[in-house]
Image (cartoon, rainbow, N blue to C red):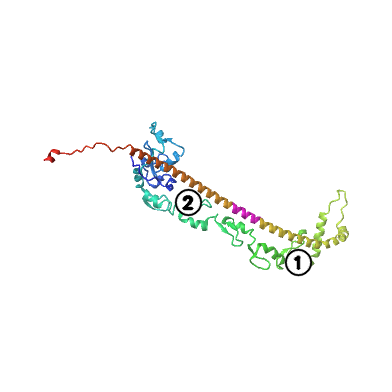
Amino acid sequence: MAAAGATPPGSLDLLQPGFSKTLLGTKPEDKYLCSACRNVLRRPFQAQCGHRYCSSCLTSILSSGPQNCAACVHEGIYEEGVSILESGSAFPDNAARREVESLPAVCPSDGWTWTGTLKEYESCHEGHCPFVLTECPACKGLVRLGEKERHSEHECPERSLSCRHCRAPCCWADMKAHHEVCPKFPLTCDGCGKKKISREKFQDHVRACGKCRVPCRFHVVGCPELVESERQQQHEAHWLREHLAMLLGGLLEAKPLSGAGDHLLSQSEVGGWEASTLLPKAAELPQRCEALERKTATFENIVCVLNREVERVAMTAEACGRQHRLDQDRIEALSNKVQQLERSIGLKDLAMAELEQKVHEMEATTFDGVFVWKISDFARKRQ
C-alpha cells in the first residue's frame, strides 16, 4: 500500500502523539486516524494486517514485545499469524503520511487565526504559537507562550526575588511576611521622627531616644502613663504617691491569706501600721526595677539574635526546598530524555528490520533469466 523506503522519524517526532482532531476543523476520515490513540496520524506506520499507527503509539505498544492487533480484534477480523504487531513487519506508510500532511489545518488556540496544512503546522507553528497555553514551572499556572517571559519576571507569585534590604532570597508571595521579620527593614521612630532605622537597631534607638514614649516603669502595678524617656524621672517624682499606692495594693493582693478565721485588719489600721512597714520595702523597688530592666534588655538582645538565627535557618530551609524542587524537575527532564532515547532505539530497530528485509529480497533476486523480445507488426516492418 505504501513504500517502505522512508527515513524513520527523528527522536523529537517520537515524543509526539497523534495530531488532535480539532486541528482539522472538520471531522476527519477514519483512514487518517491512528488505530491506537484515535487521533490524526503522525508519522504513520502500517502493520502487516493493514492497520495504521502513529510511530510513537507503535513504539509504545512494541516496548513489551510483539502484540496482537487490538483493532483487528475489535473489528472481528483477527487472523492468526497476520494480526500481529511486531517490529520486523511494520513499515513507514509514506503515502498515508503525505495525505495526512496535506490536510488543511487551523490553529486551535483562542485568539489566533493561523491556517495552513498539517505539515506547515508541525514544522512552523506547533510549539511556537504565542497563544498556546503552557504551564509555568514555578506556580504551575497556565499562561500563553507569548506572555511566559513577562509572567515569569513580573506576575508569577512564586518568582524568586531578593529582599532589597537584607538581600536574602525570597519568593514574591512570602516577601510581605519576610518584611515583618527582616532585620534590615527600615522603621520610623514615633518619638523623634527619625526614619530608616533598621529593625535590628530599633530597640537600641528606643532606649537611647529621649522622645520615645514608653510605658512607665510602674506599669506592671497599674500605672497607665506612656512617658518620654527623658521625662521618666520627672513623671516618677510627680506620681510618687500614686505609685506607692499601686505598689501597696499589689503587695496586699499578693499577701497569702492566713485562714478563714483570721481577723482582717480595717482600712485605717492598714493605713497606719502596714504603711509604716511597707514603705521601706517600697523604696527598694525602683532599684529592683532597674535591675530587672537591665536583665530584660539582655534577654531582648538574646531574643533578637535568636530571631535572626531562626529567620536565617528558615531562609536556608526554603532555599534547600527550592533547590530540591529544581533537582526534581531536572530528574524528571532527564527521565523524559531517557524515554526519548529508548523510543528512538525502538524506531531504529524498526528501520533495521526493514533494511534487513530488503537485503533478503535482493539476495533472492536472480539475473540469469531468458528475455523474450516481441516486435509488433513484424511482417510489415520486414518489408
Compared across the picture, whether 198 is left or right of 156 comes to right
Residue 173 position by quadrant: bottom right
- Furthest toward the top, the residue is 80
Which three-letter amino acid code belongs to the residue tagged 1?
A: Gln
Percent coordinates x, y for residue 229 in the rendering: 73, 66
Circle 2 SS class: strand
Q: Residue at x 60, y 52 (%)?
A: 320
- Furthest toward the left, the residue is 383
Percent coordinates x, y for residue 339 in the rendering: 48, 45
Circle 1 SS class: helix
Percent coordinates x, y for residue 207 in the rendering: 72, 65
Check disc 2 and report the residue beneath it: 134
Q: Quadrant of the N terminus?
A: top left
Q: For residue 305: magenta?
A: no
2 and 1 marks in contact (CB < 8 Å): no
Check disc 1 and report the residue beneath it: 232
Extent of the magenta region: 310-320
Magenta-highlighted stretch: main secondary structure?
helix
